[in-house]
């Protein structure tokens, strides 16, 4: 138990400080790639793989690890490069995203680095729309590409954005549409923005998006000058945790410190789904935590807030 608490304490020290830890690795050549350590369960040597019939081309097989059967994804092939040979000295990085466990085949693990999110930049504009990056940074003069794992996984297992009939409430959605209720959706992953926007549109919400916490905070500061915008129109802020320039934890902390923003309803909407979330959310003061790509859960939270706002306004749903 003490070791678990130690890990919680170590990692929550980064929360709200706009810092992150990255696991860096190589795929086929010299280029360095990275993912957030928060999402890594362990790194092990490539184990024996069992092939699967009718598998996605990027899934090289499954392996049994710690009592779980885990799909192993060739990350190089998944992002459009040549596949990694499985007959050499390779590693797999076991991760947890959106309540599921999977492993990524990589060429070799480099190191773990602790950085400030201000050192992380969005991909350059000339990168185009087909890349699999959420951000880039530099280490020792070399560019490190931070992989958009959500997009990788969406290519292999497409996400469903539909809301089940027992969750969807047409009356509340109609009232949200009639009142012009708004949501600020903050995420650096284009895949995540599209998925969440589809669900929110079904709920009658007007959606504004920002690709990182700093842009979201700038937008909120602009809206402070508009009468009743924050109190009567903006129903909530839904933010990712990991983003360049300013992460979702720091964004929430900045909101809570501002007298004109502190009462905003803030939802942390992230693919992080490990043991540390309750401590992280409690520290920065989010109202809700939900895992990404769970449309019914997202709908329940949004409709619950719409119902609360209608009650505050004295409006029957």
Image: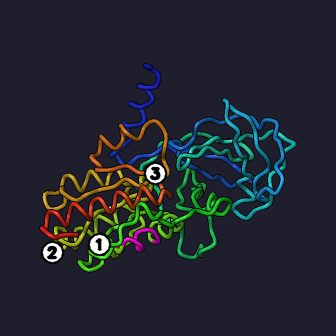
Instruction: Name the residue located 41 percent from the left edge and 51 percent from the top edge.
Output: 290
Q: CA distance from mark 2 to mark 1?
A: 16 Å
Q: Earlier in the sequence, mark 3 or mark 2?
A: 2
Q: Quadrant of the C terminus?
A: bottom left
Q: Residue furthest top?
A: 2
Instruction: Name the residue located 70 percent from the left edge and 33 percent from the top edge.
Output: 65
| Secondary structure found at label 2 | loop
Range of residues picked out in magenta: 198-203
Q: Give the x, y percent position of residue 207.
A: 36, 74
Instruction: Name the quadrant containing residue 10.
Output: top left
From the viewer's perspective, is 46 left or right of 212?
right
Instruction: Name the residue located 73 percent from the left edge and 40 percent from the top edge.
Output: 91
Q: Give the x, y percent position of residue 59.
A: 76, 53
From the image, give the main secondary structure of the stretch colored magenta.
helix
Q: CA distance from mark 3 to mark 2?
A: 33 Å
- Looking at the image, which is closer to me, 126 or 70? 70
Q: Are marks 2 and 1 in contact (CB under 8 Å)?
A: no
Q: How many marks?
A: 3
Q: Residue under circle 3?
A: 291
Of marks 3 and 2, the one in the foreground: 3
Q: Residue under circle 1?
A: 182
From the viewer's perspective, is 269 left or right of 98?
left
Q: Give the x, y percent position of residue 121.
A: 47, 62
User: Which mark, by number, is residue 225?
Assistant: 2
């Amino acid at each position: 138990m003490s070791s678990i608490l130690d890990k919680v304490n170590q990692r929550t020290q980064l929360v709200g400080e706009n810092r992150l830890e990255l696991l860096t690795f190589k795929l086929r050549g010299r280029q360095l790639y990275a993912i957030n350590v928060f999402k890594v369960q362990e790194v092990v040597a490539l184990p024996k793989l069992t092939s699967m019939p009718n598998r996605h081309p990027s899934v090289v097989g499954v392996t049994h690890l710690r009592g779980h059967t885990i799909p192993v994804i060739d990350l190089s092939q998944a992002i459009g490069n040549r596949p990694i040979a499985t007959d050499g000295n390779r590693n797999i990085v076991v991760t947890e995203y959106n309540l599921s466990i999977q492993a990524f085949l990589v060429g070799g693990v480099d190191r773990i680095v602790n950085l400030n999110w201000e050192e992380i930049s969005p991909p350059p504009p000339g990168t185009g729309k087909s890349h699999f990056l959420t951000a880039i940074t530099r280490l020792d003069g070399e560019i490190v590409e931070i992989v958009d794992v959500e997009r990788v996984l969406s290519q292999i297992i497409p996400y469903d954005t539909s809301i089940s009939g027992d969750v969807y409430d047409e009356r509340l959605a109609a009232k949200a549409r009639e009142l012009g209720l708004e949501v600020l959706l903050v995420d650096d992953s284009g895949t995540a923005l599209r998925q969440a926007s589809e669900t929110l549109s079904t709920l009658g919400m007007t959606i504004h998006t920002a690709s990182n916490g700093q842009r979201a905070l700038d937008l909120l500061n602009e809206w402070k000058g508009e009468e009743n915008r924050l109190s009567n129109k903006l129903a909530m802020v839904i933010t990712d945790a990991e983003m360049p320039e300013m992460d979702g934890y720091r964004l929430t902390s900045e909101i809570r410190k501002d007298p004109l923003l502190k009462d905003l309803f803030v939802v942390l909407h992230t693919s992080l789904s490990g043991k540390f979330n309750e401590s992280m959310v409690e520290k920065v003061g989010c109202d809700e935590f939900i895992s990404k790509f769970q449309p019914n859960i997202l709908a329940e939270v949004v409709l619950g807030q719409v119902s609360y706002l209608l009650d505050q306004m004295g409006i029957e749903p």
